[in-house]
Image (spheres, rainbow, N blue to C red):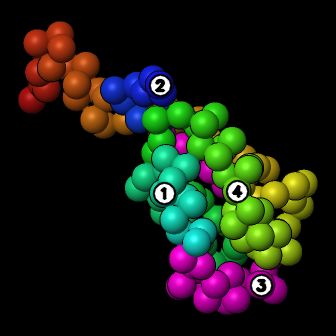
Amino acid sequence: MTVTSAVPHRVCFQLQVRADRLEEYRERHETVWPDMLREIEASGRRNYSLFLRDDGLLIGYFETDSLEASDAYLAASPAAARWEADMAPFFAALDGRPDQSFLQLPEIFNLHDQLASLEATNEGPSS
């Protein structure tokens, strides 16, 4: 039995796409392999999005109940291994698979959490 938290783990990460591969990277993500899409979902990742700046800065975001379980699932997935090997040449200064080598950014603010905290203390928002 897997224990999940009531609040999903929110993950924001950063990678750098090589400037000479930006257009192809965008094209590859217009239609991600169906088996990879299913593996991301099966790993427990939800609300998964990627954002790409013109200089190659890639920011990703997803939610999961367990980052460790999600990472382990994808690490053992043959489809994910194929996809990540295919994507690795697109990234600058990468040491390992992209899904295992990204820089995770710490969350410092979440509107929903702070509003919930206000509700819990019955303070409500101030004018």
Of badges 4 and 3, nearer the viewer stands 4
Circle 2 Cα neighbour tier, 10 Å, few/some/many (<14 / 14–19 / ≥20): few
Between 5 and 59, the one nearer to me in the picture: 5
Which mark is first along the chain, 2 or 1?
2
Q: List x then y, in percent, for residue 45.
A: 49, 50
Which mark is first along the chain, 3 or 4?
3
* Magenta region includes residue 80: no
Of badges 3 and 1, nearer the viewer stands 1
Q: List x then y, in percent, for residue 60.
A: 57, 58
Of badges 1 and 4, nearer the viewer stands 4
Q: Amino acid at mark 1?
A: Glu
Residue located at (30% from left, 37% from top): 111
Q: Is residue 15 visible?
A: no
Q: Which residues are magenta?
A: 10-34
Numbered tag placed on residue 21 in the rendering: 3
Q: List x then y, in percent, for residue 109.
A: 42, 34
Secondary structure type for disc 3 = helix
CA–CA distance in space, label 1 to label 2: 19 Å
User: Mark 2 — residue?
Assistant: 1
User: Mark 4 — residue?
Assistant: 77
Between 12 and 77, the one nearer to me in the picture: 77
Secondary structure type for disc 2 = loop
Q: Is residue 52 toward the left or the right of residue 109 in the image? A: right
User: Mark 1 — residue?
Assistant: 41
Q: Amino acid at mark 4?
A: Ser
